[in-house]
Image (cartoon, helix red, strand yellow):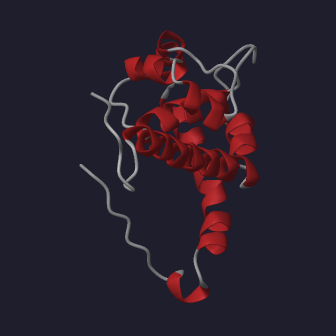
Amino acid sequence: MIHRYSSRRSPLKDFLAARLQGARRYDRIAGLACNSGLVDAINEKVHLLKRHLPHHESDHVLNITHNTLNGGSCLDDIELRRNDEAYMDALGAERIPDPTTAGDFTRKFGEQDVVDLMEAINSKRPKLWKKTLRRTERKEALVEGKS
């Protein structure tokens, strides 16, 4: 029996639309990180790697961030992202650090390294707040999140 879809969207179109929406979200996040100077700030302030081949500190930080924003609950979920062609295309990346490398990276953090990362992020916040909020909205912002 052949099923025909009515004027409603087909499951394939719904799937592709969802993937495209997700790709646009990652593209915006990656663009924001680069255009705000956050990538450079992380690379300038956080010094954990002896060599930057093939990844810099910012690549590792953003890899873990993207994994979390995509619903990842542990570093092993990065492997799912590495095999997701749409995810990789959205990031514009040929490769991302694997879960083992991400774990090695996080274990290198000492107390001062965490402070350095926070300072790198905080150094770019005023620029982002001024860009994204109108003057009347800059006084107070409420951010809600899951706990």
In the rendered structure, the answer to whether residue 24 lies left or right of residue 70 reads right
Picture quadrant where residue 3 is located: top left
Q: How far across and down, in percent of the image, does residue 145 sit? A: 31, 56
Quadrant in which the N terminus is drawn: top left
- Residue placed furthest toward the top: 100
Q: Residue at x 67, y 18 (%)?
A: 49
Is the residue 130 above or below the residue 139 in the image?
Answer: above
Q: Residue at x 37, y 54 (%)?
A: 8
Q: Nearer the viewer, residue 58 or 63?
A: 63
Is the residue 11 above or below the residue 125 in the image?
Answer: above
Q: How far across and down, in percent of the image, does residue 22 sit? A: 50, 44
Q: Residue at x 60, y 61 (%)?
A: 125
Q: Nearer the viewer, residue 19 or 93?
A: 19
Q: How far across and down, in percent of the image, does residue 126 sit? A: 63, 67
Q: How far across and down, in percent of the image, does residue 96 sit? A: 61, 21
In the rendered structure, the answer to whether residue 145 lies left or right of residue 22 reads left
